[in-house]
Structures are given as C-alpha cells and as structure tokens.
Amino acid sequence: RPSDPDLVERAHVARQALGSSAFVLGHHYQRDEVIDFADVTGDSFKLARDAANRPDAEYIVFCGVHFMAESADILTASHQQVVLPDLAAGCSMADMAAIAQVEECWDNLVDAGVAEDVIPVTYMNSSAAIKAFTGRHGGTVCTSSNAEVALTWAFGQRPEGRGKILFLPDQHLGRNTAVRQMGFGLDDCVVYDPRKPMGGLTVEQLKNARMILWRGHCSVHGRFSADNVAAVRERVPGVNVLVHPECKNEVVSLADQVGSTEYIIRQIEAAPAGSSWAIGTELNLVRRLARLHPELNIHYLDRTVCFCSTMNRIDLPHLVWTLESLAAGHPVNRIVVDPDVAHWARVGLDQMLALPG
Ligand code: 13P
Ligand code: SF4
C-alpha cells in the first residue's frame, strides 16, 4: 500500500529537526516505508556493531524487534537512549526461552555431571537475561552470520573432543551450523525440551551429545519445508535455492546457499542477470529484492509464508510518533536493560564482537 503523504512529510520534518542527534537503524525485515527513513540497514550483527559505533547520537531509534533494541541499549553509552517504535515488536523465538527455564536446564546439566564440559552459545534472538546467563557461564552470543566462528571458539574452550555446546534458543541454527558447516552428525545433537523433566533427555544422552539444542524455533522460517524446495525446483528449472539458517535442517540440506539476511542480499546483488532464485526468508525482504532486481527471476520459496508479524508492527505511523516525540524532547518507548543483567549480557556480546572475522 502507498504511504500516506502526510505521514511521509511529518517523518521528514521530524527527521530533519533531529539531525545527527538521532540515528535510525532498520533491520532488513522492516517494511519499505520504514527502511526509507533508516540511516543504516543490516542484519542483526551489523546493526549491533553500527549501534555501538555511534556515540555522538543521543537517540538510537531501533526499527527491528525488542531483543535487538535491548542489545543496542547494552552496547551503547549511558548518555544514549534507545527507543523501539512499537513496544509490542517482540520475537516469538526469543520468547521460547525464559531465564527460569534456562537456569533449571543448567541445574539439570550439573546433576547429570556434564555442566563442566558445557559452554553456552546464545543466538542474538534472545532476551538480555539469557545473554547475561551466557556471559556469566563463560559463553558467547552469536548471530546467523557468525555462528560457525562462535561454535569453533566455544569448542576451543574445552579439551579436544570433550566440549559440549548448550545452544539457545534456536535449535535449527544450532543444528544447521554444527551439521552443515562443522561436520557433526545429526546424532551428535539432542533437543532439550524445557517443558519436560530433564528436558526429556537421559543422563546418557546428555553425556554423549556434543550439541544440546534448546527447543526453540522461528515461527516464520519454521514453515518452509523440503516439499517447498522440491516444488520450486520442479516449477523453475535451474533455480538457485537460497535460505536463512533458521529454516529446518531438511530445508537447509536441500538448499544451494544458506546465510544471514545480509548474506542473502550479497548473493542476490552478485547474481548474473537472468538467473533464477527461490528465497526462503521473510517476505518484506524477498519482495524488496524482487523489486530492486528486475533483471533476476526471484521467487518466494513458499508463497504462503508471510511477514514476520512482530517486525511488521513497526510501521510509518509508529515511526512518525517516535521521531516526533524525540524532536519534542519527550522520548517514548525507551528500552532500558537492568544494569546487572546488562553487565553480564555485555560480557557475552563483547565476546561475540571479539570473535575473528
Ligand atoms: P539476521 O541476523 O540474519 O538478520 O536474522 C535476524 C532474524 O531475526 C532472522 O529471523
Ligand atoms: Fe523472530 Fe523469526 Fe521474526 Fe526473526 S523472523 S524476528 S526469529 S519471529
């Protein structure tokens, strides 16, 4: 739908009034009407780094979801204020791991006698409390663009062949990285289900596992299936299947290329004219790529897979409301992480930022 010209004008006026006192970040899954006002766009790793590198901006306006804004608050200086244009923009995957459940899981690992071999690795898509748990236990945060480097680092913290990773909260990114990129077998991975006693696992299973995967997933990427890949290959001869690593292993193992949103964009930008692509990720991004690259044949991996409903909550009316509140000196929707949680979460985030590459 075309943007309301009145709102567009108000957004320009507020943006101009704020000048360099505000820095607007836009995740690649944001609507076009929001991306139009972003000073920078990126995947969650790039945006975390960009937020941390703008000490001159009094306001960091995070057009993304709650865990991204929390991470920005942790990584920015105390005089800076991070705002999220709609506080209801959460992430269903991040909500699948509550800190009390994760603490209980750790107690179970202690009881099973394996905790000293375990290094937690937490996907960026998690609450600040889960990141703090990771920092406190000597682990690292990772994103979809550095998961392999993070796992390699984490295994390197224990003697060869002994380390185990507790991967939170996305089982698919953990499994895909271990199996596709690091040569582990599917049977090296077990799934810890927080709703079951001992996560539904035996002591023996915990002892034998190398990857203990939290039972979490993305509600958008979890909908792509192996049948979608087979169907698009049949429909579009020579198609390149390009998917995000939050997809199930059955999808990733049939795809031609796998990577973060930034990686997906790079592949499309480098693609030869006339080539065909089926992209397995959120719809705003796939639509934008199709619009920006008419020289390519871009298809959705599954036509019924929709937007990320929480990313989509940030729209032009919310952005205008937020920018106008900042321009008036009465910021709305500030994200502030508790100082103790922020301290330990920063340990995990700094570890990620220090990883090679
Ligand atoms: P990226 O890190 O690839 O941008 O992914 C973030 C996300 O939420 C994907 O669902
Ligand atoms: Fe969370 Fe999935 Fe939306 Fe990403 S696409 S923000 S993982 S629900």
Image (cartoon, rainbow, N blue to C red):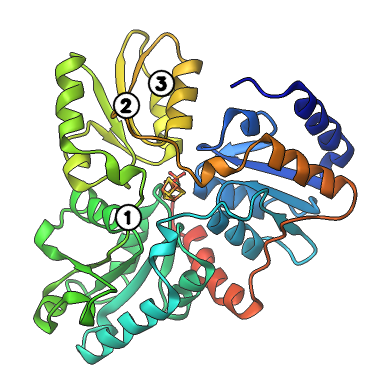
Q: Position of residue 193 (x, y in %)?
A: 24, 70
Q: Which residue is mark 3?
A: 270
Eyeballing the image, is 287 above or below 263?
above
Closer-to-camera residue (74/334): 334
Q: CA distance from mark 2 to mark 3?
A: 24 Å
Residue at (90%, 48%) from the top-left corner?
328
Q: Position of residue 300 (x, y in %)?
A: 33, 25
| Circle on res. 217 | 1
The kind of residue tagged 3 is Ala
In-image side of 281 versus 293 (left or right): left
Eyeballing the image, is 196 above or below 286?
below
Check mark 2 vs ligand 2: CB closer than 8 Å? yes or no.
Answer: no
Q: CA distance from mark 1 to mark 3?
A: 30 Å
Q: Position of residue 96 (x, y in %)?
A: 38, 64
Residue at (77%, 59%) from the top-left corner?
80
Q: Which residue is mark 2?
A: 303
Pick the quarter of the image with the N terminus: top right
In-image side of 257 versus 346 (left or right): left
Residue at (29%, 74%) from the top-left corner?
194
Instruction: Name which of mark 2 and mark 3 comes first in the sequence.
Output: 3
Depth check, mark 1 against mark 2: the one in front is: 2
Eyeballing the image, is 294 above or below 282?
above
Instruction: Name which of mark 1 and mark 3 comes first in the sequence.
Output: 1
Quick check: marks 2 and 3 in contact, CB under 8 Å? Answer: no
Q: Badge 1 local density, few (<14 within 10 Å), some, or many (20+)?
A: many
Q: Badge 2 local density, few (<14 within 10 Å), some, or many (20+)?
A: few
Quick check: marks 1 and 3 in contact, CB under 8 Å? Answer: no
Closer-to-camera residue (175/184): 175
Judged from the image, the secondary structure of the residue bearing numbered disc 3 is loop
Q: Badge 3 local density, few (<14 within 10 Å), some, or many (20+)?
A: few
Judged from the image, the secondary structure of the residue bearing numbered disc 2 is loop
The kind of residue tagged 1 is His
